[in-house]
Amino acid sequence: MLQYDLNIFSPIEFEDFSRNLLQRKLRVYMESFTPGKDEGIDFRISTKEGDIIIQTKRYENFRLLLNSLKKEVPKIKKLAPKSYIITTSVGLTPNNKKEIQNLFTPYIKSTEDIYGKNDLLNILAENGDIEEMYYKLWIGSIRVLKKVLQSKYNNTPFELRNLQDKIKVHVQNKSFSTSLSILKEHQYIIISGVPGIGKTTLLEALIHHYLSLDYEPVYLGEDISYKNLYLNDSKKQIFWFDDFLGENFFDHKNGTKRIHLIIEFIKDIRKAQNKLLILTTRENILNQAKEIYEKFKIENIEIAKNTIDLSIYTRLIRAKILYNHLFHAGIPQTHLNNLIENKNYEVLINHVNYNPRIIETIIKQKIWNSCTPDHFFEVIKAFFDNPETVWLHSFENTIDRFSQYLLLVLFTLPSPVLIDDLETATESFFFNNPRLGINYDPIQFLKSIRELENTFINTVKTGPESRIDELRIQKRVGGWDTSDPDLDLKGKIFVKYQNPSIYDFLFNYLLDKEKLVDYLLNSFIFIEQFHTLFSVQKFNETIDLDQTFINKVAARLLQIENNLSSCKINIINIGYNLHTYQKGKPFYIFLNFLYDCLSDHNKDIEEFVYRNFKTELSSEEFIYDSVYVDLLGKLDLAKFSINENKIFNNFLNYSFEIADLDLSSFEKLKLIFPDKYQKYIASKYFSNIINEKAKNAIKFCMGSGVIITNKVYDYRFRLEYITKNFQINLDKYIKQIDEVLSSIQFPEQNYEENDIEEEMVINEEMEDEMVIRNLFNKLQK
């Protein structure tokens, strides 16, 4: 008989397991129900004679099982089913079954309707396909665990208790099957990913899988040079090396030799028919190794790499990971209730910083022992809000100093940012801080980008082509002119954070490091760096400045005033990967920030704002928008020579047609220049401009070939608004738009063809939502 511990399942997993077995055994379909307070039904089989109710019970022993079943008796009598079936993870004797049957007379017709542990395992033995579905069951089997302990090759750090604990909280996902496929094809695999994503857990699951297939486990610690002592041609063996490129690896004097040994060992494994090798590493360290050791690139060992990222964690899998940890942790019920109330668990499941390691850290620290039940959720959420513990070690120990500073520079820039702008800012950082003892090197910059790729950052290339592999080509050509506001950025490379929690970590990392903040400030060259990082008061995600730092900001502004530029990228249409620089607006936002937050604290900054806004007023090309109008409303206009008509005209001429007009901002000018405004909107000139833009709108509607319904309706709304608020008669244009709208044929929707895919997605989401609610409802007792 199979020797499996069914209590390795959580209650919800055992429920799913029981359902699959009974549906196969009874050859029926069993209904599930929307979760709520347990009414004695997990599943139901409907027949002409009446309903058959099935309940699943996961307990450690018969005493606990019996106590639970006694509470079910009144519910079952109320439901009065035709028949009642029970499955349980507890092993049952004939007397145990008889006692249960007597409790539920006459609804349990026979003791055969009571499926104990052995009964379920017998069914499982007859259905190998179902057994394969639940790899969590067999990788944690008693036989496999004994093999780990008894293996004469066992040079492993694993312990029985730790293994069992990890397997219990493990949630099956597609990374396991993907890894099996890679191992089958290549006989080795490199599992890489960011810290805390589940690399070691996946490794252990794979090890246990192959132990169940009679492979001998061999752990390769630091003594890989003695690998031949472990090799045994007559046995099936699986070797593994967790974190095989750890931070200490690069300090090893014989690093090149060790790389050679690893690659040669991979070759040995592939030559054998009965050997497997699993390696894990952090993605940035693998990238670093490829830069340092040419042999890595030549041998192309990444061919068998499986990168784990957060995309494998669907909302349902996230919920199951959280649930399994909570269920097996022995947390007091009063604390769990605080998490379940108001569906607080959903905040954690949907959190942008979700990471399994955060959950593991919470459980290991047993934080419920140091907080009241009423604050349990708040304390957990604080871990998610500040994931510093997840990233700090990787930042301080696994990347070199150049890469550390590059990340801090990235923190001062908007995201995404052009890689050229990041390089410019990084070069400025090292040039202006020679005391750090690091000279800027463009080759080192590219190495750092590769080192950080997929761990701290992602690089994205607009358009259909590749990403980071084109970096050297771009740099060799010489890059592109980032000062051109009309720059076509198709095919260019952008840098963004790999995970939002990295930004949070860097923010918290800098909070108490004034010297580092000073170094950063000394190097600022983009306007976004000032207002992305600093604030006098503590606004959301900004760093406080005292008077000394405000004076330093003023000094830096004056030092680079004539060379300030923007690196802000605006995504026009994310569906087509189009990006552009937006001229003007970022600078007005910058002046607004300086005026609102810093000008009261430093006269030089106030004068900077007035001086630069005066320059903008005298320009023939500046952009007029809501931020510009805000500045007009704040500043003392007596300090400027104002041509109101020029402002009005430029505001209108900047737009081509009605849809481009920022009417709400234009109307704010009425409060700033009340007399001039009223005269202007009453003028023939204003009327002619509006009529011309209305004609352009009609040309679009009539001549575009393809009618964009939403835009046509928008035109109509705007024309009506102008007619009402500016006393300009645009009725003839509104009539023409109405004719266009009346000609639009709205096709009848073919439900099966057009909506079936959407409905499937909605139904799947609803089903997942039901399962998630059921998960956490089961934590309530």
Image (cartoon, rainbow, N blue to C red):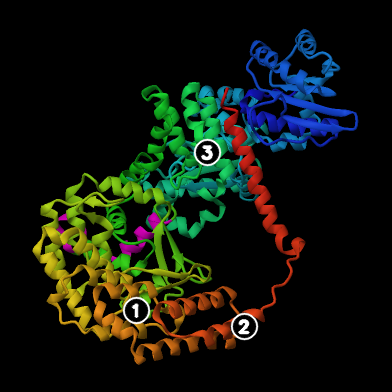
Label 2 sits on residue? 740
Question: Eyeballing the image, is 224 above or below 604?
Answer: above
- Distance Cα–Cα, label 1 vs label 2: 36 Å
* Magenta part, dominant SS: helix
| Image location (x, y in percent) of residue 760 | 70, 53
Specify whether residue 709 is painted magenta. Answer: no
Type of residue at label 1? Pro
Q: Which residues are magenta?
A: 432-453
Measuring from the top left, give residue 663's x and y in whole percent: 39, 75
Q: Is residue 668 above or below residue 705?
A: above
Instruction: Return the residue at label 1.
Output: 485
Q: Amino acid at mark 3?
A: Trp
What's the mark number on residue 240?
A: 3
For residue 99, which quarter of the picture? Answer: top right
Foreground mark, 3 or 2, reads 2
Task: Give the mark, 1 or 3, whose residue is nearer the N terminus.
Answer: 3
Q: Is there CB contact under 8 Å for labels 3 and 2?
A: no
Label count reads: 3
Secondary-structure class at tag 1:
loop
